[in-house]
Image (cartoon, grey):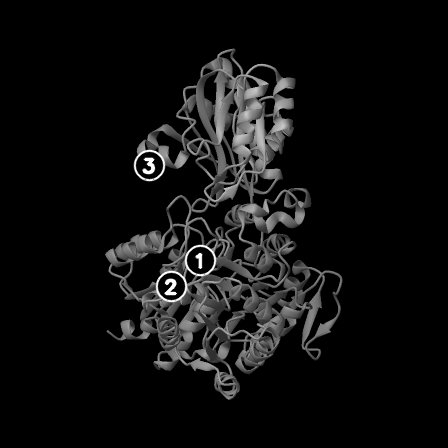
Amino acid sequence: MKLHEYQSKLIFSRYGVPIPKGRVAATAGEAKQIAEELGGRVVIKSQVLVGGRGKAGGIRLAKSPKEAEDLATQILGMEIKGLPVRKVLVDEAVNIRSEIYLGITNDRNMHRPVIMASAAGGVEIEEVAQQSPEKIIKIYIDPLLGLRDFQARDIATGIDLPREFWRPFMEIANALWKAYSDSDATLAEINPLVITSDQRIIALDGKMIIDDNALFRHPDLADLRDRDAEAPAEIEARKYGLSYIQLDGQIGCMVNGAGLAMATMDIIKLYGGEPANFLDIGGGAGSEKVSAAFRIILSDPNVKAVLINIFGGITRCDEVARGILSAIAEVKPKTPMVVRLVGTNAEEGRRLLADAHMETAETLVEAAQKAVAVVKGA
Amino acid sequence: MSILINKNTRLLIQGITGHEGLFHTQQMMDYGTNVVAGVTPGKGGEWVLNGKIPVFDSVKIAVEVTGANTSVIFVPAKFAPDAMYEAADAGITLIFCITEGIPVQDMMRVRNYLDQKEVRLIGPNCPGALTPGESKVGIIPGNITFPGSVGVISRSGTLTYEVLYALMHADMGVSTCVGIGGDPINGTGFIDILEMLEVDPRTEQVVMIGEIGGQGEEQAADFIASNMTKPVVSFIAGQTAPPGKRMGHAGAIIEGGAGTAKEKVAALESAGVRVAKHPEEIPDLLRQ
């Protein structure tokens, strides 16, 4: 779950990271008021969960409260990469002498958190990694020990930070580590961390991603979720414990298991169709879950056919077939369906569905071909 | 012969009194696995499954009394890290964690702790392992495969069953099937299992089922190119997965443009691995 810049910076500041003076505003009037309180120049920053806000015109400098109000009006009316701007952050403007990148993330290969820094701040770290990887200093953190001072110092020397900034930099690195670790983040990033012309070191931007699996122990963070960044169907799916991702094809997919769901999408494409979604109904596949899955898949107007692919291992296929039939009786979908049941009691399951005049398939290839044929014939 | 589990496996079930724990313990026993004990804190002294399996309050006592050497974990994500620490601390050397949804920072701590103890962890978020005809630890259905010479490794659950089923229909049996799990941080990777299958005398060919996310398949490709004499056939799920979206498994995500199916297929093919276009093609490739 991604957090907004203002949310991330507030969390960082609680741990002692210096951030610019400022507040978030939902209206232009509020933005003006904040600019008046701050005095001097301010930066108006759109709060949306996508990158490239600056390029899209979503970050602007205002010299007066009146200009802050005008710019906030513009920005609050914008959509950036399809997401509406509902809030702007109004921050004091600072004079930048140099920009640093500082971030902590999980390294899958090393099974450890890694702290990364670069003197080339202000640009996306992926870009730096591609063009000049030697400019990125990486230090792996023992998760049982946490970030040690010598490591923070090694980072400071690694990016040629002047000595007078070592102490404040180490404090910021430690604060970032604590924020990352206490919040169960998978990413905690300050980009840029700037040294100002009046010799302050301050986090101008902030980004955090929180591990969805850890939200059970962070109800305060779970409340920060921005629903604009998700398709409504994805939010609905989460309520039923379904994992759903909307795509732009025409063949809806309902599958048990994430790997098999991906493989089903892939084989649709292989036989000339386009999957409309990823959907993992998980184990069990009882009628309540299947009904919810039908409603979610069919809420996408692009869907012209539905492919149901269930592997019955522990779950018996005849039970799954009964679940599908009672879900159909409830939802009454008009969209054509192709059902493939395989595994334990598959024949019995297929017979139940065939008796209900449903199109069935034995193999994955056959199922994909039939679903594609339905869409092409429609 | 087989890898990881066999007739000498003395299995302990952590979370045996839960719904999943009880159900799968019965399934494992029906398959012939030697289940010796269960652990549920607070329920020590009870006997479950018609009085066949004793329940203990702690792994330590269970190990002392029954000589359990392998553990399988069915406890909820909130308690699973503690269950893994407890098993390792009690001297269990092989742990299977079936639980899905463990926070990734917990898993980093668990992994680093277990590495110091020289304990092997399979999973989490995995279906376990199956040595057909001998032993089953976890939740892989026993009736979709039979003893044979194909070793199977996978990051997935039902997709693995799909492949086992396709092999069975092609009259191909399996030496051992291991699910390493779909989480970004796990205990055992592809390479560890490839290494075991390479030296396992019963295994003649290997099927490796990967998916988007991480670099595990690319690293496995390097390992195969320089260390494997046995033929490897692969399938990579997620060709059509959009970047930046988590495809059900916590580890199945294309991050910063890396971890795509295309890159993985290319790496495997350049290591001499034949990559199937879909799961049902795997038996044909094994026959060639």
Would residue A330 be visible to someone looking at this image? yes
Which badge, 1 or 2, is on the more N-terminal residue? 1
Are there few (<14), some (14-19), or many (20+) residues within 10 Å of tag 3? few
* Relative depth, front residue between B52 and A318: A318
* Tag 2: amino acid: Glu
User: Which image quadrant: the N terminus of chain B?
Assistant: bottom left
* Tag 3: amino acid: Gln
Are there few (<14), some (14-19), or many (20+) residues within 10 Å of tag 1? some
Q: Residue at x 59, y 43 (%)?
A: A184
Q: CA distance from mark 3 to mark 2?
A: 32 Å
User: Which image quadrant: the C terminus of chain B?
Assistant: bottom left
Label 2 sits on residue: A274
* Tag 1: amino acid: Leu
| Residue A105 position within the rendered picture, expressed as x and y whole percent measured from the top left | 49, 39
Q: CA distance from mark 3 to mark 1?
A: 29 Å
Q: Residue at x 27, y 71 (%)?
A: B285
Label 3 sits on residue: A130
Label 1 sits on residue: A247
